[in-house]
């Protein structure tokens, strides 16, 4: 094929349970695209599943037996990508019909954006929709100024990993994903890209993000201290991209948001957590602060699907 316009980066590790459904969601949407699957040492037949789709999906397989993380696998795929635009897709997430066409239209109509993103759905192990995952960017397609997008995204990562497209060169320039950020590498990347320029937004849910008990979101947060550090690093790195007064206000909300996430993670894993100090911090925000906090964290929309999942397990 000629040079693709979009590269789909897929880090793979023992994904046989969901990989067929993930690949099937790409069917009919890869014209002008390439799919790059980087396979960490897997023993469940994931590679054979990929091989069966090599021709139909214009899929390249790269073996990385020494790799130890999805971030490393993604960086390998990023370095090998041939297209100017890239998007990430994990082995348990899905594209919705029309995603490729919608991304192409967004790139054509909003070419000055540094990041093109859309809403996503939460799904469970059976592909049932259990919620919506999206930043508070409104109900209409728009091009948000860098400062506005950053002010929302610094408070909480409300962007689903399979719901973003960006330029390969912009991600490669600083070295790709930070491989030390086992929990927040994607959030760190979104903030870095948003700091570079405007963000294109489409409110349509064009991807699905799977939540399940074995996900890194669930297992990695058991180490509360490490989890807290992971949440703090992206905010500390990128808050200075805002003007000082706005950085002070947004940074305060971000700290409370991270404290809340740590408390929720601790409670989920059965640790004793101190909710009163956190409750007082939220109470002191006042009505306007409450509105901004609950809008930017989307705490209800993020927590309820996971609580339902735990009740079923």
Image (cartoon, rainbow, N blue to C red):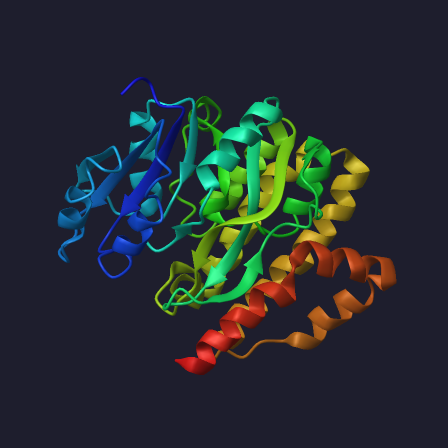
Along the viewing direction, whichever of 205 and 147 lies nearer the viewer? 205
Q: Which of 220 and 41 is in front in this view?
A: 41
Residue drawn at point x = 13 percent, y = 54 percent: 45
Query: Disc count in the image?
Result: 0
Q: Position of residue 86 (x, y in %)?
A: 42, 31
Q: Nearer the viewer, residue 65 or 208?
A: 208
Locate residue 30 relative to residue 245 in the image: left or right: left
The answer to whether any part of residue 211 appears in the image is yes
In the image: residue 108, left or right of residue 270 = right
**Occupied quadrant, residue 243:** top right
Relative placement, left or right, of 236 versus 92 is right
Q: Is residue 51 above or below residue 267?
A: above
| Residue 155 percent across, percent down from the top left | 66, 50
Give coordinates of residue 301: x percent, y percent. 61, 64
The quadrant the C terminus occupies is: bottom left
Q: In which quarter of the image is the N terminus?
A: top left
Q: Which residue sits at x=63%, y=76%?
A: 274
x, y percentage for residue 48? 13, 48
Q: Residue at x 25, y 61 (%)?
A: 17
Q: In this view, does 26 lie above or below 309?
A: above
Q: Residue furthest right?
A: 287
Q: Which residue is drawn at 45% across and 74% down?
A: 309
Whether residue 269 is visible, yes or no, is no
Q: Is residue 126 left or right of residue 163?
A: left
Spot the residue most to the top. 2
Give 26 or 185, whichever is nearer the viewer.
26
């Amino acid at each position: 094929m000629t040079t693709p316009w979009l590269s789909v980066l897929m880090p793979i590790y023992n994904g046989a349970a969901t990989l067929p459904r993930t690949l099937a969601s790409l069917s009919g949407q890869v014209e002008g695209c390439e799919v790059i699957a980087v396979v960490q040492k897997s023993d469940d037949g994931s590679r054979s599943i990929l091989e069966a789709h090599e021709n139909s999906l214009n899929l390249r397989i790269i073996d990385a037996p020494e790799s130890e993380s999805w971030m490393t696998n993604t960086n390998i795929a990023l370095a090998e990508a041939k297209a100017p635009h890239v998007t990430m897709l994990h082995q348990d997430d899905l594209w919705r019909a029309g995603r490729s066409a919608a991304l192409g239209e967004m790139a054509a109509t909003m070419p000055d954006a540094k990041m093109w993103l859309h809403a996503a759905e939460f799904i469970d192990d059976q592909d049932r929709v259990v919620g919506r995952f999206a930043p508070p960017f409104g109900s209409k397609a728009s091009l948000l100024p860098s400062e506005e997008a950053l002010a929302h995204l610094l408070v909480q990562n409300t962007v689903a990993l399979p719901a973003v497209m960006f330029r390969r060169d912009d991600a490669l320039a600083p070295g790709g994903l930070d491989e030390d950020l086992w929990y927040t590498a994607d959030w760190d990347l979104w903030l870095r890209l948003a700091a570079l320029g405007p963000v294109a937004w489409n409110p349509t849910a064009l991807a699905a993000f799977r939540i399940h008990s074995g996900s890194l979101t669930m297992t990695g947060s058991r180490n509360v201290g490490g989890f807290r550090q992971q949440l703090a690093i992206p905010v500390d790195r990128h808050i200075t991209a805002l003007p000082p007064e706005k950085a002070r206000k947004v940074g305060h909300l971000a700290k409370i948001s991270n404290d809340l996430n740590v408390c929720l993670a601790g409670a989920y894993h059965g640790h004793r957590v101190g909710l009163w100090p956190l409750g007082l911090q939220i109470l002191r925000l006042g009505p306007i602060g409450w509105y901004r906090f609950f809008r930017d964290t989307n705490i209800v929309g993020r927590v309820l699907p996971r609580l339902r999942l735990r009740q079923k397990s």
